Amino acid sequence: MTKLLLNRRSLLAAGGALAASGLIVPASANGLAPTRSMRGGSNNYQPGAPIVERIGGGGFLMTGTVRRAGDGAPLAGQRIQIWAHTTEGYESDPQSHGATLTNEKGEFQLDMPQIVPAFGQPHGHLAYDSGEFETVFLRPVMKSASDKTLSAHFVLKPA
């Protein structure tokens, strides 16, 4: 028979693992809490990147959703800028930046070159910066440099 030992340390560790996995979504008194900007998310940000069909030759898919804080309603027509260190350029290169708009379900996707590790981690950068809501910068890290997709999700608070 397996004996389950629960103490403060094991409960804290389990809660941290669930939060890191994205299974726990922070709540606020009014419902869904807004996404906080991530440290390093704004690195090499270039305001006004053009809306594009894809960045470079493609082959890697960045996806995500945009919802309103509080009620979680999907936000259509929101501009999301995406950039990364890829097989075709550095994070700071203008050709490594592009933007896309969310669809009626608040979903976005942008085909781009394969993301490669920068500073030891394969990661992307995303920004909501249109002005209707507070600016949010995200820097999601891939599980593996061989992954072909990466997702990021925004919950926005009115500006």
Image: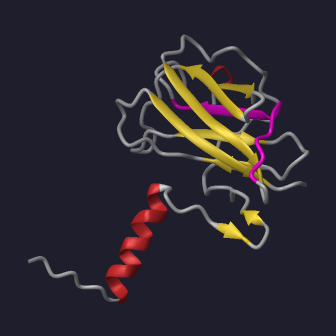
* Residue at 77%, 27% in the rendered image: 49
Q: Position of residue 28 (x, y in %)?
A: 72, 70
The quarter holding residue 75 reads: top right
Residue at far bottom of view: 7
Q: Position of residue 85 (x, y in %)?
A: 52, 31
Relative to 17, is 117 above or below? above
Toward the viewer: 113 or 132? 132
Q: Quadrant of the N terminus?
A: bottom left
* Residue at 69%, 14% in the rendered image: 53
Q: Position of residue 55 (x, y in %)?
A: 62, 18
* Residue at 74%, 46% in the rendered image: 67
Q: Which residues are magenta?
A: 72-85
Toward the viewer: 50 or 18? 18
Residue 101 lies left or right of residue 143; in this view the side is: right
Relative to 149, is 5 above or below? below
Q: Is residue 90 visible?
A: no
Residue 114 lies left or right of residue 133; in this view the side is: left
Relative to 57, is 14 above or below? below
Residue at far top of view: 57
Magenta residue check for 120? no
Toward the viewer: 106 or 1? 1
* Residue at 69%, 47% in the rendered image: 154
